[in-house]
Image: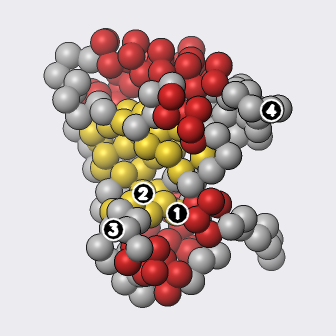
Amino acid sequence: MQTSDTIRQAIAAGVTICGENRVQEMTAHLDDDAYAGAALHFIGHLQTNKVRQVVGRVELIESVGSEHLELVQDILLEVNIGGEASKSGISPEELSALAAQAVGSPHVRLRGLMAIPPVAAGPDGNRPFFAKMRQLYVDIRSQMDDNKTSFDCLSMGMSGDFEDAVREGATLVRVGTALFGPRPPMHKG
C-alpha cells in the first residue's frame, strides 16, 4: 500500500492519473485527499457490494466484466484476452454482446477496453495479445453508432510491457510498479 504522502509526491512530480485496485485503500486515500490534482481510475475487480464506494468517486472504472453492475459511470470493458481462469473479464467472444448492452444502458458511458495479458515468456511475448486487443477495439468501435467519439480508450500494458502495448495501440498504460516498486501481497485475515 502506498502512503498518501507518496501519492501526493507522485502527483507533484507530474503524475496526472492515479489508479487503484483495492477499494479499501482507495477510500482511505480519498478520505485523506491524496489524489488532489490528478484523475483517479479504479482498475481492480469490482464486487457488486463495493460499487457504491467507487461510483462517482473515480473518473473511470477500467475493469467492468459483468452486466450485473448498475453504474452511472465512464467504464472500460475488461477482456480476459489470455483466457486465464485466474483473471476476471469477459472472453473476446462475449465482448460484442456486452458492449452493445453497455452502449444501450443509460447508466454507463462505454469509453473503451482494458486487458491484462498473461505474464510474458520473453521480450515481445505479449505483442500478439496486444494486437488482438487492438483489433477487438477497432471491431467494437466500428459496431457503435453514436458512441464513437467517447469510445477512445484502449488500456493495456503494465510496467514490464508498456512499450509493446503502446506500439500496438494502447492509449492508457499502468506503470505503478515502475514508479513505486512492487506491492506487498495482500494479507487475508
Q: Is residue 149 above or below residue 187?
A: above
Residue at 20 percent of width and 16 percent of height: 145
- Could you tell which of marks 4 and 3 lies nearer the N-terminus? 3
Distance from disc 2 to disc 4, alpha carbons, whole Å, reads 29 Å
Residue 168 coordinates in the image, percent (x, y)? 51, 25
| Residue under label 3 | 38
Asked if residue 68 can be seen in this view, the reply is no
Identify which amino acid the numbered label 2 is placed on: His
Depth-wise, is mark 1 or mark 3 nearer the camera? Answer: 3
Identify which amino acid the numbered label 4 is placed on: Gly
Mark linked to residue 41? 2
Depth-wise, is mark 2 or mark 4 nearer the camera? Answer: 4
Q: Are marks 4 and 3 in contact (CB under 8 Å)?
A: no
Q: Residues within 10 Å of mark 1 (few under 14, many from 20)?
A: some
State the residue in front, 4 or 179: 179
Residue at 29 percent of width and 41 percent of height: 108
Identify which amino acid the numbered label 1 is placed on: Glu
Distance from disc 4 to disc 3, alpha carbons, whole Å, reads 33 Å
| Residue under label 1 | 20
Q: Residues within 10 Å of mark 4 (few under 14, many from 20)?
A: few
- Could you tell which of marks 4 and 1 lies nearer the N-terminus? 1
Residue at 78 percent of width and 67 percent of height: 185
- Could you tell which of marks 2 and 4 lies nearer the N-terminus? 2
Residue 131 coordinates in the image, percent (x, y)? 55, 19
Distance from disc 1 to disc 3, alpha carbons, whole Å, reads 13 Å
- Could you tell which of marks 1 and 3 lies nearer the N-terminus? 1
Position of 72 with respect to 118 (left or right) is: left
